[in-house]
Amino acid sequence: MEAGKRGKRRGRQPIGPDPEAGAVGAFAARLLRLKQEAGDPSYAEMASRLGAAASKSSLASAARGQRLPTWETTWEFVRVLAVDRLGRDPGETEREWRDLWERARVEPVDEPVNEPVDEPAEVEGAPRTARRGQVLVYVMSSVAVVTAGLTVLHLALREDRRETPPAPAPTASVIPRDDSEFLGDVTYPDGSKVRTNSTFTKTWRVRNTGTIPWEGRLLARVNADPCKSPETVAIPPTAPGHTVDLSVRVRAPGKPGKCRIYYKMTDAQGRVLFPLKRPVFLDVRVVGS
């Protein structure tokens, strides 16, 4: 179909965020503007062809503005559009959007306050057919008696009350956050050529961008490939804010072709960490000697 004859995508139109509805709505509106700047791909396309490590329903929900998405979903939304499609700097983009996400996360939400409505008191025992003047005199007399009693009680309470200092406000606790940032390939960037049956070392550089030290962590291989490499590799202890180089020793196969190996970070028990982040990977061409 010619480009000029394309129409809008069929089906239900997505629910747009309200940028005036608060910090979450404004954040979702930013996500939607980024999506439009990148050519407005569908959420299914973002989750498949563009390679976002999040489902299309999670991506769509992030741009509705009904609730704040997780940072992992946010970054996958931004990464495939701003970095992969629009070519923006990964580090600057992640810092910019992380700041926007953090501000939206801590923005207070105003709760509606229901004011009580005073109901008129009903005079018990008054006949429905009583004349208005008699009822009014009775009510006013009752109110005068009650008011006098309340005044005496209030004065007595003021005399006897002991002032107590207000309780100190609770201090906000810092929530531990585990996070990482891929900085780049140190050796053998994507598309590099290696010889058949050769042995080489692939190295990636990452940063601990969370508040939790990395201790006892591993890189675990998550796919099979003709290239040979260890199933797991120990990650050196890394403090928050520090960078670390992660290296694996690889042996190329005896036949030319492609070599792709994927690794994910796990804890000592083998549980995958950062499941929504893309794995670090090796992608080289194996050529004949």
Image (tube, helix red, strand yellow):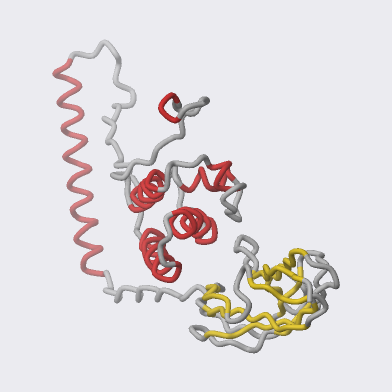
Quarter of the image for residue 226 reads: bottom right
Give the residue at x 26% y 10%: 129
- The quadrant of the rendering that contains the C terminus is bottom right
Residue at far right of view: 254
Q: Position of residue 227 (x, y in %)?
A: 80, 71
Q: Is residue 243 above or below residue 99?
A: below
Q: Position of residue 188 (x, y in %)?
A: 63, 77
Relative horizontal placement of residue 212, taking residue 159 as reference (left or right): right
Give the residue at x 52% y 40%: 42
Q: Position of residue 258 (x, y in %)?
A: 74, 64
* Closer to the camera in the image, 199 or 100: 199
Relative horizontal placement of residue 61, taking residue 152 as reference (left or right): right
Give the residue at x 14% y 18%: 133
Residue at far front of view: 289
Q: Is there any visible trace of residue 16 in the rendered image?
A: yes
Relative horizontal placement of residue 55, taking residue 97 as reference (left or right): right
Q: Position of residue 130 (x, y in %)?
A: 23, 14
